[in-house]
Every structure is written in structure tokens, then in C-alpha cells.
Image (cartoon, helix red, strand yellow):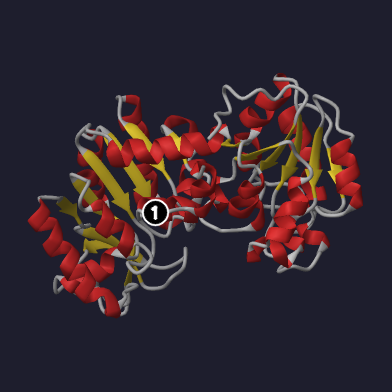
Amino acid sequence: MNNISTYDFNGKRALIRVDFNVPLDKTTLAVTDDTRITAAIPTINKVLDNGGSVVLMSHLGRPDGVPQDKYSLKHIVSAVEKAVGKPVKFANDCLGTEAFKTSSDLQPGEILLLENLRFYEGEEKGSMEMAEQLAKYGDCYINDAFGTAHRAHASTAVIAKCFPNDKMFGYLIEKEIDSVDQVLNSTEKPLTAIVGGAKVSSKITIITNLLDKVDNLIIGGGMAYTFVKAMGGNIGNSLVEDDYIKTAKEIIEQAKKKGVNLLIPVDTVEADAFSNDANTKTVAIDKIDAGWMGLDIAEESISDFKKVIMDSKLILWNGPMGVFELSNFQEGTKEIALAVAAATKKGAFSLVGGGDSVAAVNMFDLADEVSHVSTGGGAMLEYLEGKTLPGIAAILEN
């Protein structure tokens, strides 16, 4: 495997798989959050500064193999140009003669963006034929799209086979891998994992994997009520997965056996409706009123969690503490975000991943105050679960 820092790009076209699956305004189709674009700039600049040219390829949305204007990458060209500080050529098709000719004519320092890869069914089906066509646009291949590394698509896992001696990770993927490995494999203690979100079912594999590694496991969000019910508490109309009550009990028991400090909220902000205008009050989490539902952690839980976070050397945060998108139920998530930032400033290494957690740190302007914010929700979750990611394995293979 090659290393981007030492590879000689002089006079070469670097075909880079980026993750420019960015949100667009529904009316103007302008980019509303360029985080994923700016994350790729160090890799792009490395190639250009080293005398190479760049061909960028990405997907956008789920067009299901059918070209659709609202999913066209032409809408992000200006955002890419702004981020990289130079003109960006655009190919109206990611396959075909135009893309081949434009990529062949690229001069050192120039950038070409291909149209949406998912306008072809072959991308998601992992077509070798499509991968071989795409491979004609570059002299070397860089995978810098961590957000799609868990998919065996034509432009990620399959295309790497076309560059047996000229494939590598980009700086973003390198940082993503290093950050997760630092959390999971470091000897520094204590390691605290904060796992929130709506459902136990979506996080069960992660939690199980983490129990062998963490010192503290904080449970928050909607999944907490399944644990509370498993312990015999009254949770009213709170979100619960009855099919996972037995699983929750097993996790509690496993945490005890492994000596993991498992923290489940002790109080909650309950509401009489799932609405920002609902009536609310703070109650013990196992004594939620009939007909009411818990929508956020409350003061005592926040205090307990913050103490553990502030004493941690390594922190992994995946999932919010409540319905933070509603302003009246975002205090718990905000306070935990602030605590993670404060612990980072104190010297802890913090990794934030998963769509809602990332949205939360961005909402509270704390992205620059944690060690690393992962760009790959599903990919990071699968990596934490211990799964092999096809896009990663394809680069590592000889």
C-alpha cells in the first residue's frame, strides 16, 4: 500500500473518491453544509501541490440509478471551487467520452468533478465494468470517502483492484481510522463511551463490542427507557423496544461482570406530548407519569455524566441524550457536548461520530473543540462494531 504523504503525484492524474454527499437547500439547491467538502481539501491540495491533477468522484443522495437534476453534482461545483480556491471543471456524465477526454486533457494543478456516480446502477451493485471505466480517468487512486467505506461499491472497494500498485488512503480516511483506533486500542484510561439515540436495536453490536474496552458506559436518549423498563421502572409513554428488554438486562449483567461502570439516567424531563409546546416537568426516570414521555435527561443525570466525562482520558460519543432538535429538550445533549469539549481542553482525546451527535456539536459550535468529528456515520458504527469495511480492506490488500 502506498502512503499519500510520500507518493509522487508529479504529472499524474489522481482519481479521488470523495464523499460530497452534502445537504442542499430544497429550493435553491445550494449547499447548506460544506463540512464534507472542506474535509477533503488537504488531500486535494497534496496532489496539486505535488504537481498532479485531480479527478473527483462522488455520489449525492439516492437517485437509484436514474439521473435526476436535484441530485446532480453540478449544484455543488461553486462550493467546491470556494473551498479549494480555484476553478473546477465539471463532466456532465461520470462515464463516457466527455469525462474520458476531459480527464485525459487535465494539466497539472487542474481539477475535474464527475457527475453523480449513483446515476448508474453499477455503482451500488459493485460493477467491475463500471470500475474499469472509471479507472481510465486516473493514474492512481485515492479513497478519501470514509462515509462510504462500509459499502462494496464500484468506486470504493471494486475500483481499487484496478490500481494494484497505485492505491492509497487520503488524509481524511487516515485520520478517521487513526481516531477510532486511538479510542479502541489505546492503553490510556479511563475510556468513556457515551451512547445515545433512539433505539437499543441499532446500537446493540457497538455496546457489546465496547463492553470489553471501556471503563465507563453512559446510556442516554430514547434507548435509556428500554433499560429503565428492564429494571422495573415506570416509563409511561416513553419510547421503548419491548423486544430488547431481555437484551438490556443482559447488557446490565455483562457490565457488572466486566467491571464496567454503567450509567443510566436517574431523572428525565417528561412531556405530555411529543411537541416543543408540551407541558413538561422533571421526574425520576423510573417514575414517569402515565400518558407522559421522557424526552431528555435532567439535572441529576447531567451532573453524574459530566463528572465521569471530565475524569476521562478517552471519550467516544455516539448519539444524543434527548430530542435535541426541539429546543425545549436539548439541554441534556448540549451539556454533554460542552462537557466533552471541556474534557478535550483538559487533555482528553474525544471522538464524536454518528449523524445526530455530529449535528449536535455543529449546532452548538463545538466541532473545533473536540479531537475529531467523524464524517462517516454508518461507516464509523460498523468500524466500532469490529466489522471489516470493504473500502478500507480494498486499499490494504496487496
Q: Residue 80, percent across and down?
A: 74, 37
| Residue at screen point 69% across, 26% down | 47
Q: Nearer the viewer, residue 392 or 200?
A: 392
Label 1 crowding class (10 Å Cα cut-off): few <14, some 14-19, many 20+?
A: many
Judge left or right: residue 378 versus residue 163: left
| Residue at screen point 31% across, 76% down | 241
- Looking at the rendered structure, the kind of residue marked 1 is Pro
Using the image, determine if residue 126 lies above or below residue 339. below
Using the image, determine if residue 219 lies above or below residue 6. below
Judge left or right: residue 1 versus residue 342: right
Q: Residue 288, percent across and down?
A: 24, 71
| Residue at screen point 34% across, 72% down | 239
Q: Residue 97, percent across and down?
A: 91, 51
The total number of labels drawn is: 1
Using the image, determine if residue 221 lies above or below residue 92. below
Q: Nearer the viewer, residue 203 or 58?
A: 58
| Residue at screen point 41% across, 51% down | 383
Instruction: Choose top left, top right, bottom left or bottom right for residue 129.
Output: bottom right
Q: Nearer the viewer, residue 44 or 354?
A: 44
- As helix, strand or loop, the secondary structure at mark 1 comes to loop
Is residue 296 among what the camera can see? no
Instruction: Choose top left, top right, bottom left or bottom right for residue 4.
Output: top right
Is residue 95 among what the camera can see? yes
Using the image, determine if residue 70 lies above or below residue 367. below
User: Mark 1 sits on what residue?
Assistant: 320
Instruction: Choose top left, top right, bottom left or bottom right for residue 9.
Output: top right
Q: Residue 236, percent across and down?
A: 27, 76
